[in-house]
Amino acid sequence: MAEHSTISTLTLQHRIPDDWAADPWAEVRPLVDGVDVLKEVHPEGFADSCRHWRGPRESWPLAVAEKPRRIMITAPTCTAGCCGALYVTIRRDGDQVLWEAWENTSNTTAVPADFRFDLAQYEAELARAAADRRWEEPVDTVARLLGQTLADSGWFERWGCVLSSVSPRREEPDLPDELTGPQGVDVHFHQVHGAGERRKSYRCELIVTQDGPVEEQLRRLTDRIMADDPRKTAEAEC
């Protein structure tokens, strides 16, 4: 333990990626002692989005366990096999957390140093980030709550369908109005078929405003989806 005695501080920062089309949810970016050390060695990489931080604590991307975990800590917008990714092994060492055994498959010579964190500070920061909603814009809040509402309702199963995803749809800041649609929420679902049958997918595009109360918008969109067979108002994707 003496070789890596310096204890660093982990901070998790929500950030909406510039290329949000790859994943419209904010990424949860790890900073070590206030520095984005991952960007220095893997500038094209994105951290896991906040949608991966909604399950039980042990499923969180940076969760630490008694056994070492090798994780992909940043990935490109395409695939790791195409452009490479950054990996780290996370393990518990007494009352500390160690990040070690880095692997950069996009640049074999550029990797961060190993880091040690105080276990209590580390786990407290993970819990804080998982519960953090301050970064959300109305479109994010509506998408998150609508996803929870629809998943809990069992509505799509009633019509022989499965809810695939609910995600925010952002405006493109660099495109003229005629080339970009209004911001909103995209609801994706698919119809369940028997073995060997082709799956049919659907998308429903809903509009969300910046100034409308979130509760009213959530109620309006929920009522629209659950008014009838959702396949009647959705756009078939295949």
Image (cartoon, grey):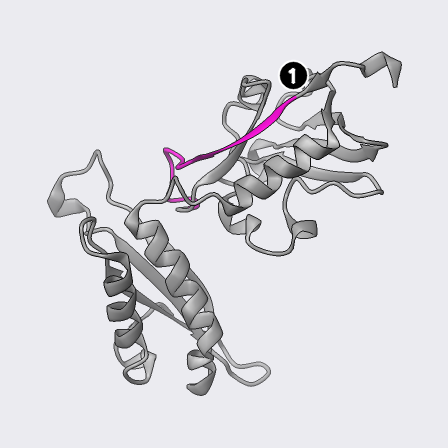
Residue 20, position as x, y percentages in the image: 38, 41
In the figure, 134 relative to 55: above or below?
A: above
Tell me which segment is drawn in magenta: 9-23
Specify the quadrant of the image occupied by residue 103: top right
Residue 154 falls left or right of residue 202? right
In the figure, 94 relative to 52: above or below?
A: above
Specify the quadrant of the image occupied by residue 67: top right
Q: Looking at the magenta stretch, what is its main secondary structure?
A: loop
Residue 149, position as x, y percentages in the image: 42, 69
Q: Which residue is mark 1?
A: 110
In the figure, 155 relative to 176: above or below?
A: below
Asked whether residue 81 is in view, the answer is no
Residue 29, position as x, y percentages in the image: 52, 32
Q: What residue is rendered at 28% in x and 62% in y?
A: 215
Residue 110 falls left or right of residue 128? right
Q: Amino acid at mark 1?
A: Ala
Residue 231 falls left or right of residue 2? left
Q: What residue is rendered at 38% in x and 39% in y?
A: 135
